[in-house]
């Protein structure tokens, strides 16, 4: 039986301008080409979960504009339930403008828009979703007070809460109070805790840090080294798959969504779920782009069977 996953998070339209070189201050240059694609950490994670077979619900906000319509259609096409996405009449849909030069270097400007305008009142219609969900996942591209309120309500419904603290910011203690699983990458982990990761001892110290804050389950993604996990039942390091990466965009989001699609709510299959999530992520980095590179479940299973 497939997991049911609710995602509270960001929805962006990413527009990329391909250029020979970056302009100097005051200079106007011509772009070689321009492309737009759906994105945002929340939307990427939702698509990763849905493509791996999870029944996926989205809680978020878009503007009353063409970008918002584009994103709602994109999520619906991925079989993500959009009933709890609110239309904001004041703020525009979140956007990211990427300038990419021929050497692969980029400049990115992000407009949070409706993502940052998400309010606790926007959660009013989420009871039906939380009645169904096994997991509620959130990140830091929407306001933390909304995440805290959503996580608190999720606990009343017996839902496992999963925090992906990216991009790293100081965490509201109210969020941690209702978090069951936290999953930073190694850079985010060091920023959040002040503990530099240089071996198992430092990772166990990080686990203790979060346990003292009320979060008993820690996952730290370590890039090519794999994923460290710590739960009340044990800890370990699950190695990564060795592949040649061409674009790491959405690798972390793919890992979170795909892994959560497989994880049992009692975490008794955590190593198997981590292997699955890492395999999915390893496929994502071998293709260009964010959402278009996220694999489907059958592709992940096929890749796992090759090893």
Image (cartoon, rainbow, N blue to C red):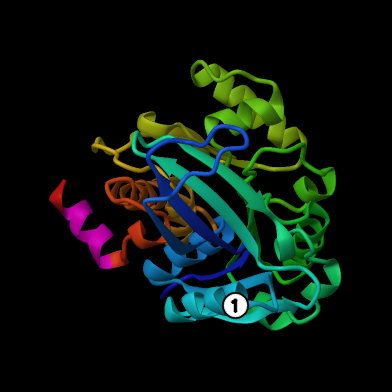
List x then y, in percent, for residue 60: 68, 69
Which residue appears at 36% of the width and 62% of the height? 292
281 lies left or right of 123: left
Q: Residues within 10 Å of mark 1 (few under 14, many from 20)?
A: few
Q: Nearer the viewer, residue 173 or 13?
A: 13
110 lies left or right of 219: right
- Vertical arrangement, residue 209 with respect to residue 6, above or below: above
Quick check: is 241 in the magenta stretch?
no
Q: Which stretch did the figure color magenta?
A: 298-305
- Vertical arrangement, residue 154 with respect to residue 103, above or below: below
List x then y, in percent, for residue 206: 63, 27
The residue to which callout 1 is attached is 66
Which residue appears at 31% of the width and 66% of the height? 296
List x then y, in percent, for residue 217: 60, 43
Which residue appears at 16% of the width and 46% of the height? 307
237 lies left or right of 176: left
The main secondary structure of the magenta stretch is: helix
Quick check: is 302 in the magenta stretch?
yes
Which residue appears at 55% of the width and 80% of the height? 81
């Amino acid at each position: 039986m497939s997991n049911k996953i609710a995602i509270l998070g960001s929805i962006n339209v990413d527009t990329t301008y391909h250029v020979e070189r970056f302009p100097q201050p005051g200079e106007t240059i011509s772009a070689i080409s321009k492309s737009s694609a759906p994105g945002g950490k929340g939307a990427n994670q939702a698509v990763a979960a849905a493509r791996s077979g999870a029944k996926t619900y989205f809680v978020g906000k878009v503007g009353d504009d063409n970008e918002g319509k584009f994103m709602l259609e994109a999520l619906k096409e991925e079989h993500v339930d959009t009933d709890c996405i609110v239309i904001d009449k004041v703020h525009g849909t979140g956007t990211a403008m990427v300038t990419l030069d021929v050497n692969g270097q980029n400049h990115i400007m992000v407009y949070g828009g409706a993502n940052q305008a998400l309010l606790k009142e926007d959660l009013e219609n989420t009871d039906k979703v939380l009645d169904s969900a096994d997991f509620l996942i959130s990140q830091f591209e929407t306001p933390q007070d909304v995440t805290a309120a959503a996580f608190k309500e999720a606990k009343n419904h017996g839902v496992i809460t999963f925090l992906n603290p990216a991009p790293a910011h100081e965490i509201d203690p109210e969020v941690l109070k209702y978090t069951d699983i936290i999953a930073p990458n190694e850079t985010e982990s060091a920023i959040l805790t002040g503990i530099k990761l240089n071996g198992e001892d430092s990772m166990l110290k990080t686990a203790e840090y979060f346990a003292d804050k009320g979060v008993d389950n820690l996952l730290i993604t370590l890039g090519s080294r794999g994923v460290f996990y710590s739960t009340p039942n044990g800890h370990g390091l699950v190695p990564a798959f060795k592949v040649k990466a061409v674009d790491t965009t959405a690798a972390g989001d793919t890992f979170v969504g795909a892994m959560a699609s497989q994880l049992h709510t009692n975490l008794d299959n955590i190593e198997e779920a981590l292997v699955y999530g890492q395999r999915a992520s390893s496929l994502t980095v071998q293709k260009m782009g964010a959402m278009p590179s996220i694999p489907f479940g059958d592709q992940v299973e096929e890749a796992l069977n090759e090893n």
